[in-house]
Image (cartoon, helix red, strand yellow):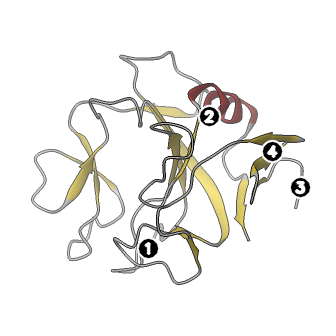
Amino acid sequence: MTPRDLVLTPMGLRFQGRLFPCSIGKGGLRRAKREGDGATPRGLHRIIGCLYRPDRMARPVDWAVPIGPGDLWSDDPTLPDYNKMVRAPYPGSHERLARSDRLYDLVLLTDWNWPIAHPGRGSAIFLHRWRKPGHPTEGCIAFAPQHLLHITRALRPGACLIIP
């Protein structure tokens, strides 16, 4: 572990000497993650990117990529684009990135089941805003908006997310 790593603990996410409250997946923590189980996967995951809504916030870091109205995330394990960002129209199952709520205004991408996605192991594990404190996710890790922004500005691509 290094000071630039993010470490999930029972009390929250530890990063650069601070502890940030967060929510995890409704399926708890699992080593054997499967698509749709709602679990947050244990292990070491790298931060590989950042997405943001330019219509709702300024670019948070120079490596952030804007989310547009047609941007989607494929969660269809039968298609070659599984666990990748795709554009509408898209024939398979997907999640809209430009959501009407604010959950994906700022997203940190992890390398869970990426760059080569194995069907059924689960699609994207994001770090994103929470609905409300303590409200579980579908497997991602969620934070208060100001904490997510602080974390995003303080880390760099390649930082490790450690989920013991």
Q: Residues within 10 Å of mark 4 (few under 14, many from 20)?
A: some
Residue type marked 3:
Thr
Q: CA distance from mark 1 to mark 4?
A: 28 Å
Location of residue 117 by image quarter: bottom left
The residue tagged 2 is 148
- Name the amino acid, label 1: Ile
Q: Secondary structure at mark 2?
A: helix
The secondary element bearing badge 1 is classed as loop
Left or right: 95, with 1 as reference point: left
Mark 2 packing: few (<14 Cα in 10 Å), some, or many (20+)?
many
Between disc 1 and disc 3, whose residue precedes? 3
Q: Which residue is mark 4?
A: 15
Mark 3 / mark 4, whichever is N-terminal: 3
Question: Where is residue 62 shown, x and y percent of the image?
Answer: 60, 27
Which of the image's four quarters has the N terminus?
bottom right
> Residue 35: where, in percent of width, then height?
36, 74
Mark 2, mark 3: which one is toward the viewer? Answer: 2
3D distance between C-alphas at marks 3 and 4: 10 Å
Q: Which mark is residue 116?
A: 1
Asked if the residues shown at circle 1 and circle 3 are in contact, with their CB atoms under 8 angstroms apart, the answer is: no
In the depicted structure, whether residue 75 falls above or below residue 153: below
